[in-house]
Each structure stands twice: as C-alpha cells, then as structure tokens.
Image (cartoon, helix red, strand yellow):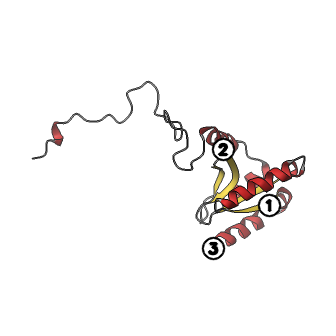
Amino acid sequence: MNDDHNETPRPLHRSSSGPPPRSGEDRGRLRHRTVGAPAPTVKRARYMRKNMTLPEVLLWQQIKGKKPKFRKQYPIGDYVVDFACTAARLLVEIDGKAHDMGDNPQRDIARQQLLEAKGWSVLRIPASEVLADPSAIAEGLLRKVSDQ
C-alpha cells in the first residue's frame, strides 16, 4: 500500500522572500553548474552578452538559430570567449585593435594555449573581416563546424 497521498505536498518555490536564485547563484555554490566557471566569470559573461561589440553583433545575427548551435559570450573557467560551438569544441574570438596593443598579444597566446590544452580549438578572426562581410564569415564558420 502506497501512502504517498498522505504526505504534505512540497512547495514549488523556496519559502524565502524573493524569487529563487538564478543559475550559478545558488547559496554556497562556487561554480556555475553547467560550465564550471566561477560566479564572477558567469556574471561578466552575462554583462558582455548585453554589451557586444558591433562585429560580434553582426556575426551573431548570422549564426543565431543555425545548426550546430553557437553560444555567445561563453564562460570557460576564468575566461569568456566571444562564441563557442560546444558540439564541435570550437571557440571563436573576434579580435579588434585592442588585441594588438601592449601585452595583449602575449596574453591571447597564453589564453589560447590553455583553452587548447582543455581540448578546444580556437579560431581567431579579425574584426575588420567580420565588418567587411559578416555573412561570408558566418558561412565559413558553419561549414567548418558541420564538417567536423
């Protein structure tokens, strides 16, 4: 005999004031539950999704909703990459002029080596190429990931 009907129903939400926590903001949780990124990196990725550069917006308009799926401003560890295709393990970085200044080239190389050591392929595309022809860049990206 099953006495499940005698148990009190569980509430749908916590009995605390306010809404339930957003993903990655659970009490005591140090890392995002799906990508393993620290909470500050997830927060930075959310901000960057809302404040994308023009080349990022133009490319996103071309690849959004296509298969295989790309994610924008994707957090990985302590980094946020411009676009990621998790199915193909491909990361796409749109490099503007700031990537050529100061010690940024060395930091980009170190970051790329770390991401490649984690099993990702990294594709760097100059922002000027995206601005010149975003649809051609998008077609090339989609062709690259569908060939893998």
Residue tagged 1: 125
- Residue 83 drawn at (x, y percent): 68, 56
1 and 3 marks in contact (CB < 8 Å): no
- Mark 1 nearby-residue class (10 Å; few <14, some 14–19, many ≥20): some
Residue 107 against residue 68 in the figure, above or below: above
- Residue 115 drawn at (x, y percent): 69, 57
- Residue 44 drawn at (x, y percent): 67, 40
Residue tagged 2: 45
Q: Seen in the image, is 111 located left or right of residue 28?
A: right
Q: Seen in the image, is 127 located left or right of residue 25?
A: right
The answer to which of marks 2 and 3 sits earlier in the sequence is 2
How far apart are labels 2 and 3 at the CA level?
Answer: 27 Å
The one nearer the camera, 91 or 72, is 91
Q: Amino acid at mark 3?
A: Gln
Q: Amino acid at mark 1?
A: Ile
- Residue 106 drawn at (x, y percent): 84, 52
Q: Residue at x 29, y 36 (%)?
A: 10
Callout 1: SS: strand
Q: Amino acid at mark 2?
A: Ala
The one nearer the camera, 80 or 49, is 80
Q: Seen in the image, is 4 located left or right of residue 121?
A: left
Q: Residue at x 90, y 46 (%)?
A: 102
The answer to which of marks 1 and 2 sits earlier in the sequence is 2
Q: Residue at x 76, y 65 (%)?
A: 137
- Mark 2 nearby-residue class (10 Å; few <14, some 14–19, many ≥20): many
How far apart are labels 1 and 2 at the CA level?
Answer: 20 Å
Residue tagged 3: 148
- Mark 3 nearby-residue class (10 Å; few <14, some 14–19, many ≥20): few
How far apart are labels 1 and 3 at the CA level?
Answer: 19 Å
